[in-house]
Amino acid sequence: MSQHPSTASIPRLSFEFFPPRTEGGKASLGRVAEKLNQLQPAFFSCTYGAGGSTRDGTCETVKQLLDMGIDAAPHLSIGADDEQQTFALLDQYRDMGVRRIVALRGDLPSGMGRTRIVNNAESLVKRIRAHSGDHFQLEVAAYPETHPDARSPAEDLRFFSEKVNAGANGAITQYFFNPYAYFDFMDRCSQAGIDVPIVPGILPITNYEGLIRISEKCGADVPRWLRKRLEELQEDEAGLKSFGVDVITRLCEDLLAAGAPGLHFYTLNRWGASLAVCKNLGHWA
Ligand code: FAD
């Protein structure tokens, strides 16, 4: 792997939320953000629903976080948005004080059909740079286990390289449970001359069925040993959560020891498992 452990800096920490749909969800998100903010993460990010379906919700969540004094990075996907909608959102984010965006092609809402996808994340990065210059720090997505749409790992790497070259400052990966997928990806990035920070995305394990469902949807591999252990523990909520924290702590330790520049937690709007793992790792307050 090309990146080496940094002796000088604390690994970058970030947490991802999705926009809550209810007033109760908004209040709960505020409490979750407060809990996780005690670790002083670099930023919290907020997803952008498939096809722009949470445009208002993402904005509101970002505002809620900014109002709490927390650095917030909206995700922005092309989805079904046209150029003018993207530009309007970029201006709105700039005016709100946003300095970082996670730029994605995005998934389409079910039923919309793949034919509506005419652009990829590379074109969104270009669109943002053309409209907003260097105002935003841009993160893009990376896939150590290869994106389901890619014909091969080599093709996937080529598209990744193109969106980085279009002006991304860094990347956050899809989650994975096998650190060797990340190590191999980092080696291939290094060989391809890609030198932006690539932060592993981490999914805390708190539930068996949800994990299997979401992993099938996004093409993340759940190794047989892990699937079997979680299946066995699914009626024992406390036991499963404790096992999940141990597994994810070990994964994060391996990644950071090998030089991963930080960790990005897919919190699913919950704080318990993410906080427990971070406290085990001991790098943050
Ligand atoms: P791209 O990088 O554009 O492409 C994905 C894959 O398609 C590439 O890996 C490549 O193999 C292939 N490809 C790219 N360009 C071409 C081309 N010209 N021709 C042929 N094949 C091509 N989804 C949401 O809807 N909202 C979110 O907020 C969100 N947040 C995410 C955050 C992270 C950190 C990650 C890892 C994913 C997130 N996703 C989100 C999911 C993401 O939108 C999907 O994985 C989507 O299918 C691909 O988005 P992308 O930006 O990686 O796309």
Image: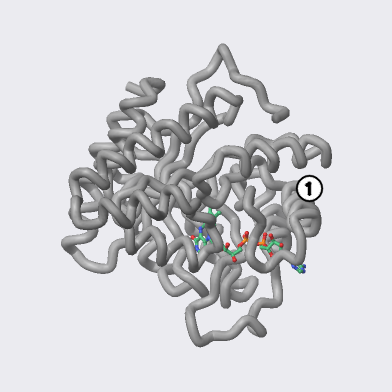
Q: Describe residue 131's horizontal placement relative to residue 27 as left or right.
A: right
Q: Describe residue 12's horizontal placement relative to residue 70 as left or right.
A: right
Residue 126: percent from left, percent from top: 73, 57
Asked whether the viewer can see residue 97, the reply is: no
Asked whether the viewer can see residue 126, the reply is: yes
Residue 144: percent from left, percent from top: 64, 48
Disc 1 crowd rating (10 Å Cα; few below 14, some 14-19, many 20+) is some
Q: Taking 40 as reference, is 105 above or below it?
A: below
Comparing 273 with 245, the one in front is 245
User: Who's the residue at 33% across and 26% down the image?
Assistant: 280
Q: Secondary structure at mark 1?
A: helix
User: Who's the residue at 34% across and 34% down the image?
Assistant: 246
Q: Describe residue 7's horizontal placement relative to residue 110 as left or right.
A: right
Residue 223: percent from left, percent from top: 50, 51
Residue that label 1 marks: 165
User: Who's the residue at 55% across and 58% down the image?
Assistant: 90
Q: Splitting the image into 4 quarters, where does residue 281 fall?
A: top left
Q: Taking 187 as reference, is 85 above or below it?
A: below
Q: Taking 4 as reference, is 20 above or below it?
A: below
Comparing 209 with 279, the one in front is 209
Comparing 11 with 240, the one in front is 240
Residue 226: percent from left, percent from top: 42, 49
- Indicate the amino acid at tag 1: Asn
> Ligand 1 falls in which quarter?
bottom right
Q: How many marks?
A: 1
Pick out the residue farthest to the right.
192
Comparing 252 with 96, the one in front is 252
Q: Describe residue 271's horizontal placement relative to residue 218 as left or right.
A: left
User: Who's the residue at 48% across and 36% down the image?
Assistant: 263
Check the picture and name the quadrant holding the C terminus. Answer: top left
Check the picture and name the quadrant holding the N terminus. Answer: top right
